[in-house]
């Protein structure tokens, strides 16, 4: 069949007509696809032009790592991920929780577990996640100890790590009381009595945690404030300092990794 001649293109309103070519656009301006591809880069460039943050990001993320770096080096990041997961699930739990010692706390937890959509799942993630974080932090500490990463010049990072470990323990201890059931109540009394038996500071510490001589409503709200405001805030600041030092000092090579001899020395020995 003979092909029909093509009809001339209809005239477009001026708003839809392609803009005249600019100097340097000899091959036609960027098409929609090209523009979409460039959109991310343009957005990042826009922010960078105003903040100069790309240098800091490059410094933090694009570092050289020693030869022999292996899966054990991911334990720190895994601990951080566990902390982030605790923070996110904790925010959702806090939307329903009431630190009310006369039955409200227990009831709010029962409500989250039995009635709220995905409540049991989120609560389970937070509860099991706390154990995961404690296990991971110990494994990470073991890795840094066995690889000798506590030595010069990383002593300060080790000390910050010890404080992070203590704060993680405080999170686990204060969180345990919050459901305010029989187990939480009596376990915390035992914990406070152990604290109180410590030398010198022990009795003051347990008095402070209890919020006075009596274990009750003040203890619960105090534990809640420590658990969801004070200690997470400190942990965020200290993780920031910890990671700053990791980026500044770099990581330690595994102990079995031998230093490469400079070429002159190798030649001299040969
Ligand atoms: C919330 C807890 C913690 C987080 C999120 C965290 C995170 C990290 C990360 C991401 C690294 C980079 C290399 C790696 O993962 O091994 C690191 C390194 C390091 N961490 Fe931690 N850490 C925590 C707790 C601790 C504890 C409890 C200690 C020891 C008491 C510690 C001591 C160190 C040391 C010495 C390094 C340097 C390792 C090296 O140079 O090879 N950290 N940490």
Image (tube, rainbow, N blue to C red):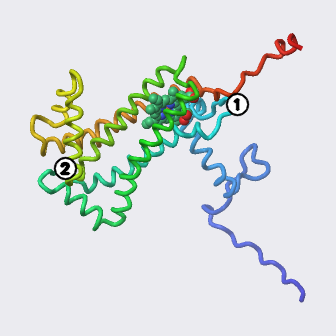
Residue 263 vertical placement versus 231 (above, below): above
Question: Measured from the top left, where is residue 158 in percent x and y?
Answer: 47, 25
Front residue (pair 250, 170):
170
Find residue 216 and report its horizontal and vertical position in percent: 12, 44
Q: CA distance from mark 1 to mark 2?
A: 51 Å
Residue sitting at 54 percent across and 33 percent down?
A: 143
The residue positioned 51% from the left and 25% from the top of the image is: 245
Quadrant placement of the C terminus? top right
Rendered position, 262 above or below 256: above
Residue occupied by mark 1: 67
Badge 1 or badge 2: first in the primary sequence: 1
In the image shown, does 223 or 237 lie closer to the viewer?
Answer: 223
Residue density around tag 1, few if under 14, some if 14–19, many if 20 or more, within 10 Å: few
Specify whether 159 is left or right of 39.
Answer: left
Q: Are marks 1 and 2 in contact (CB under 8 Å)?
A: no
Location of mark 2 (residue): 99
Vertical position of residue 129 compared to residue 215: above or below: below
Question: In the current view of this chain or complex, which residue is farthest to the bottom?
Answer: 1
Q: Residue at x 37, y 57 (%)?
A: 124
Q: Quadrant of residue 236?
A: top left
Q: Which mark is residue 131?
A: none
Assess mark 2: CB under 8 A from ligand 1?
A: no
Circle 2 SS class:
loop
Q: Residue at x 60, y 48 (%)?
A: 40
């Amino acid at each position: 069949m003979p092909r029909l001649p093509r009809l001339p293109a209809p005239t477009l309103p001026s708003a839809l007509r392609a803009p005249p070519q600019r100097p340097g656009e000899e091959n036609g301006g960027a098409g929609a696809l090209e523009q979409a591809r460039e959109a991310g880069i343009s957005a990042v460039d826009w922010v960078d032009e105003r903040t100069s943050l790309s240098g800091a990001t490059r410094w933090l993320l694009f570092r050289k790592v020693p030869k022999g770096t292996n899966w054990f080096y991911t334990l720190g990041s895994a601990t951080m991920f566990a902390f982030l997961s605790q923070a996110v699930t904790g925010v959702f739990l806090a939307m329903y929780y009431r630190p009310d010692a006369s039955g409200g706390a227990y009831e709010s937890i029962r409500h989250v577990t039995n009635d709220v959509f995905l409540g049991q799942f989120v609560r389970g993630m937070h509860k099991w996640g706390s154990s995961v974080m404690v296990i991971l932090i110990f494994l990470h500490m073991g890795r840094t100890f066995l690889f000798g990463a506590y030595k010069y010049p990383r002593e300060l990072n080790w000390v910050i790590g010890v404080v992070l470990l203590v704060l993680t323990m405080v999170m686990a201890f204060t969180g345990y009381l919050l459901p305010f059931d029989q187990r939480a109540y009596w376990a915390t009394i035992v914990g406070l009595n152990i604290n109180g038996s410590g030398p010198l500071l022990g009795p003051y510490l347990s008095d402070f945690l209890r919020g006075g001589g009596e274990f009750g409503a003040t203890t619960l709200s105090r534990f809640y404030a420590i658990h969801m405001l004070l200690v997470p805030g400190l942990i965020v600041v200290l993780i920031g300092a910890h990671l700053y030092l990791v980026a500044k000092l770099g990581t330690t090579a595994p102990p079995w990794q031998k230093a490469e001899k400079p070429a002159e020395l190798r030649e001299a020995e040969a």
